[in-house]
Image (tube, grey):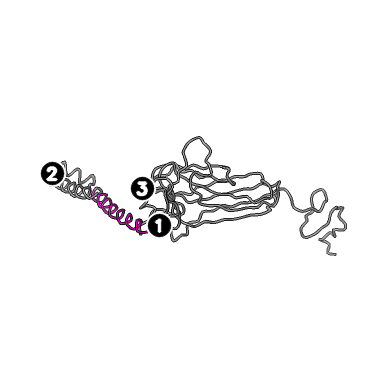
Amino acid sequence: MTYIADVIGWKFNDQPGMSTVNRVITEFPGGIPSQEDQDKWTAEYEAWKAVMDEILRLEALETPRRIAEAHLTDEGKAWIVANRDLIATERAKL
Amino acid sequence: MATTKVDSVLLDTTGTASSSTFLRGDGAWAAAGGGKLLKSHYYQNGVAATSTNTTPFDDTVPTISEGYEYMTTNFTPLSATSTLHISVVATVGCNTLTSSMMCLHNGGAALVTNRQYLAAGEHITMVINHAIASPGTSQQTFSVRIGAATGRIYFNTDPSYDFGGTHASSITVYEVEA
């Protein structure tokens, strides 16, 4: 379940004046945002987070053994290049 | 009378023996005094809350408008000459590497501050133990405000899990006779 505090923190770069109690916004500069806005920002956040989670997963695959093999063999180098292509594809979605 | 007992009338005492008095070394029947617990008060808060309201990491005294007020409780001392021992325990996290300041206020005045350095996603227990002379027998309002220098404070929760609201932060006040 996505935490609305994370959503507005991400959307508004943790600007001061945003508070939540029991996952409900209780303070927000200029007044509490509409539910429609909150739902829209939540969807944007979840899409962003899905991409970031995939990038982190792909980066975590590049273990010291994989990096060593990239230096030692053509197959190892090809694997790293392919993984970097996958990461670039994800980054392009941001 | 059993041989193991001494009738109180045989003692050279002053005062009145009763269920609320004790015999002192000087022979006086008197109520317990000096360090007696007059009153205790326990306030617990398990509400999950977050805030981006900051507390500056500097040499100034935290004000009542800095940070976010996560806990508040009222306490009316029984005596104007007692001491109030105040204990604060709070479960606090942050979403970024930063200093987090927790300040105990009485009314609008800061009493004492605790500062911890938090790593992103880290969750810790922050504690304040403080004692003040009783401000009198009028109602006192103790509040706890917490703010990070930057980023977002998580109180009784973290981004993913709050254990169904079973985190517990608290303010405990003991009033002790002088």
- Under mark 2, the amino acid is Thr
Q: Is residue A27 left or right of residue A61?
A: right
Spatial distance from mark 1 to mark 2, Cα to Cα?
44 Å
- Magenta extent: A35-58
Residue annotated with mark 2: A73
Residue annotated with mark 1: B161
- Earlier in the chain: of badge 2 and badge 3, it is 3
- Could you say whether the residue bearing mark 1 is in a helix, strand or loop? loop
In this orientation, which residue lies closer to the viewer: A23 or B170? Answer: A23
- Under mark 1, the amino acid is Tyr
From the image, state whether disc 3 or disc 1 is nearer to you.
Answer: 3
Spatial distance from mark 3 to mark 1, Cα to Cα?
22 Å
Q: Dot 1: within a 10 Å radius of its alpha carbon, few (fewer than 14), some, or many (20 or more) residues?
A: few
Look at the image and say whether residue B51 sits in the magenta stretch: no
- Picture coordinates of residue B177, whole percent (x, y): 70, 49
Quarter holding residue A39: bottom left
- Could you say whether the residue bearing mark 2 is in a helix, strand or loop? loop
- Picture coordinates of residue A70, whole percent (x, y): 16, 43
Q: Dot 3: within a 10 Å radius of its alpha carbon, few (fewer than 14), some, or many (20 or more) residues?
A: few
Residue annotated with mark 3: A12
- Picture coordinates of residue A60, whole percent (x, y): 25, 49
Check the image and name the residue furthest to the front: A30
